[in-house]
Amino acid sequence: MTVSLSNHLFPRTPLFFKKLQPTTNRNRSTSAVKCRRSHEFRNRNPIQRLHLSTENYRNTLSQPNDFKEADIKRALYRSCGAGKYGEALYHLESMVKIGYKPDVVLCTKLIKGLFRVKKAEKAVKVMQILEQFGEPNAVTYNVLISGFCKLNRVEEANRMLNRMRIRGFVPDVVTYNIVIGSICGRGKLGLALKVLDQMKEDKNCKPSVVTYNILMEATLVKGGIGGAMKLLDEMLSRGLRPTIYTYHVILKGLCREGMMDEAFDFIRSLPANGCKPVVISYNILLKALLDRGNWHDREKVLREMLSAGCDPNLVTYSIFMMSLCRDGRLNEAIRLLRIMMEKGLTPNTFSYNPLISAFCKEGRLDSAIDVLDDMISNGCSPNMVNYNTILSTMCKNGNADLAIDIFEKLYETGCPLNVCSYNSMTVALWNNGERTKALNVVCQMIHKGIEPDRITYSTLISCLIKDEMVDEAMALLKEMERRGFPSTVYIYNSVLLGLCKSRRLDEAIDILEEMSVKRCQPNVNTYIILVKGIGFQGWIDEAIELATTLLHMNVISKKSMSRMSFTFNDA
């Protein structure tokens, strides 16, 4: 594909585009996909072209009855190593049929890979094969439990934990840590602390430093620094020695709550506790100060950092870069970039990206491309974040066709486009009024064998709601759940907002009931959207009554209540 660059847009051909020369031959994916060709729907509603369904992978290899066991074993290892987990499972099933005893290490790796691609049922199938024909171990069960926890399928994780016990495997500290981490991830700190109590009573398994680290991080999110400090004291009383990671958890908590003097004192106290501060310790403190716009104390941090024998590293400079760019001090940021290189540090993509983003935000596309050119000439290969920033700005500036051409050229040259890349491009196009082109990008993604993820669905649902295409958004929500992606409160809120704006209150209440059935906890925004929807329907008294009830239940704040009352008074 040739791309014509307008002299008006670029006074010269950017270096980053000269780099886009094909280096590999791309073979079309063998996966069967459901994405209708664009010429078939040229005159139809572009939404009809969107089919985010991909057929389950089916191996087309013939049954290898004439293969030797060694051949099948090699094929099994090769498939698993290449990430072709469906194919690997097929070979595993073939091998056990001819008497092969499954290898526990390989099966564990296969289970982990299947969870990575969200094929939980196939992962369970591997475990069933291993239990029937081989010998699973505690690690295999831990991988299964962890996989279910990461997919937020806690009931299955509990069943697997019980199955582990029934087969004679005693849960170890890793098992408990997986369970506690999953519970904390769901915001249920109280339940996680009960599991900690169970561990303390277990004669065969005691809490570790990692256990307390997980709980301290969750406590900082839920209960604040006081609770985390109590856990640290308990940890010390049990004879456990905190690591530098443990201290960093506390340090981040102090910084998050704005306790900067205490954070300084905490770092100074570390040597007395047998743990010397490292450069990361000072980077945490520096970032917290600069995030608050406190440039005055930066010199104090740098002095203490140097006196402790910690030289500023690439992350230190990148923190300064982000803060300078955020505050619009771009000339200083460019000078800092030069200082980094003079000191022998090689800037990476994270160093350059704040500059590229800041120039794009100011509409200075040429300057952003200059930075990208310098980046390449200094031996730093741009990543998709850098490219996405440039392409998004092109879309905003009305150069969507050029952005799409460059995006496609990136794929041809071997740039690792993934689902995140396509999601970003879709949002950039849709938000700038290029709905049809945005849907084309999604179809191209599926056609190339890249499956949509939850963000793809939530992005499109949000875009459809913004364009008042509520029915299409609800249909896509059902398709998303059918494909194994449970909806989140944020996605439900988006649909609720669309329904309320369309004065479809009955359906909005149905969605709220659906959330309850599917155990998706509404948040404050859910109720605010619903109250406003009732008010805009004309039932202002009922809306205010519901808001008052929610206020008394501490579901919404007084500030939210005042804002809603003001809105209804204007109505």
Image (spheres, grey):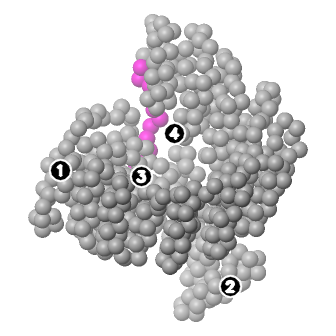
Q: Earlier along the polypeptide chain: callout 1 or callout 3?
A: 1
Q: In this view, does 496 lie to the left or right of 437?
A: right
Where is mark 2, residue-wise? 558
| Residue in the picture at 49% in, 27% down | 80
Mark 2 against mark 1, which lies toward the viewer?
Answer: 1
Label 2, residues with CA under 10 Å away: few <14, some 14-19, many ≥20: some
| Residue in the picture at 75% in, 45% down | 208
Q: Residue 277: x, y in percent?
A: 61, 57
What is the C-alpha distance between the residues marked 3 and 4?
A: 15 Å
What is the C-alpha distance between the residues marked 2 and 3?
A: 38 Å
Q: Earlier along the polypeptide chain: callout 2 or callout 1?
A: 1
Would you say the residues marked 2 and 1 are in contact, meaning their CB atoms lie under 8 Å apart? no
Label 3, residues with CA under 10 Å away: few <14, some 14-19, many ≥20: some
Q: Earlier along the polypeptide chain: callout 3 or callout 4?
A: 4
For the residue labelled by badge 4, is the local secondary structure a helix, a strand or a loop? loop
Mark 1 against mark 4, which lies toward the viewer?
Answer: 1
| Residue in the picture at 68% in, 58% down | 271
| Residue in the picture at 25% in, 58% down | 374
Amino acid type, label 1: Lys
Instruction: Name the residue furthest left.
Output: 7
Label placed on residue 330:
none
Instruction: Name the residue furthest bottom.
Output: 569
| Magenta-colored span | 51-61
